[in-house]
Image: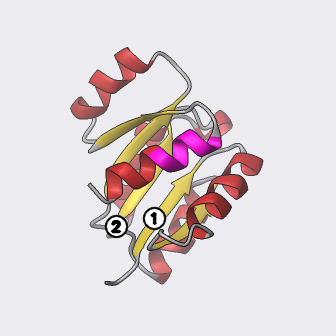
């Protein structure tokens, strides 16, 4: 089975590194994980090779929201990736909003272990 390729986008670089390590270093995980913190990073990854999933934080600091980043990517780059939103904010409100904004899933940011577990469940469901 070919590895699923995912891109995680967050402005919290330490959390990106921890998530990447958690997801890639599990023996039962068939994932190739890329990380980015802004549009330039996303462009670099997607121009190299498309991803199966793009997991994006709702709040991305100075670059805006994950919804805005998704729109910019879709207007400027060619990707067939499914988009998943993650956030520490009000899970109920964002979990409903993510469908309206064209996201295929929502993950509540708790701790990195929980995020990794939720991502694997979503991707390999």
Secondary structure beneath dot 2 equals: loop
Disc number placed over residue 43 in the picture, else none: none
**Vertical comparison of 19 with 113: above or below:** below
Residue, disc 1: 6
The location of residue 56, given as percent across then percent down, is 49, 46
**Tag 1 near tag 2, CB within 8 Å:** yes
Residue 85: name its quadrant: top left
Residue, disc 2: 52
Magenta extent: 112-117
Question: Is the residue marked by circle 1 packed among few (<14), some (14-19), or many (20+) residues within 10 Å?
Answer: many
The location of residue 76, given as percent across then percent down, is 38, 62
Secondary structure beneath dot 1 equals: strand
Q: Residue at x 27, y 66 (%)?
A: 80
Figure quadrant of the C terminus: bottom left
> How many discs mark residues in the rendered view?
2
Q: Residue at x 60, y 38 (%)?
A: 60
Per the model, the C-alpha gap separating discs 1 and 2 is 6 Å
Magenta region, main secondary structure: helix
Question: Is the residue marked by circle 2 packed among few (<14), some (14-19), or many (20+) residues within 10 Å?
Answer: some
Query: Does residue 29 appear to the left or right of 104 in the view shown?
Result: right
Q: Can residue 70 be seen here?
A: yes
Q: Residue at x 44, y 73 (%)?
A: 30
Residue 124: name its quadrant: bottom left
The location of residue 108, given as percent across then percent down, is 48, 30
Q: Can residue 40 be seen here?
A: no
- In the rendered image, the residue lying farthest to the right is 14
Figure quadrant of the N terminus: bottom left
Q: Camera-side residue: 66 or 75?
A: 66
Label 1 vs 2, first from the N-terminus = 1
Query: Does residue 101 appear to the left or right of 28 in the view shown?
Result: left
């Amino acid at each position: 089975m070919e590895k699923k390729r995912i891109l995680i986008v967050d402005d919290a670089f330490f959390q990106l590194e921890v998530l990447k390590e958690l997801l890639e270093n599990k023996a039962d995980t068939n994932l190739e994980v890329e990380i980015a913190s802004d549009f330039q990073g996303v462009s670099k990854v997607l121009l190299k090779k498309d991803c199966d999933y793009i997991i994006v934080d709702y709040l991305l600091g100075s670059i805006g929201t994950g919804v805005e980043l998704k729109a910019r990517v879709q207007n400027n780059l060619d990707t067939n990736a499914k988009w998943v939103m993650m956030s520490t904010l009000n899970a109920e409100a964002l979990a409903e909003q993510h469908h309206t904004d064209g996201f295929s899933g929502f993950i509540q940011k708790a701790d990195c272990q929980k995020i990794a577990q939720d991502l694997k469940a979503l991707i390999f469901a």
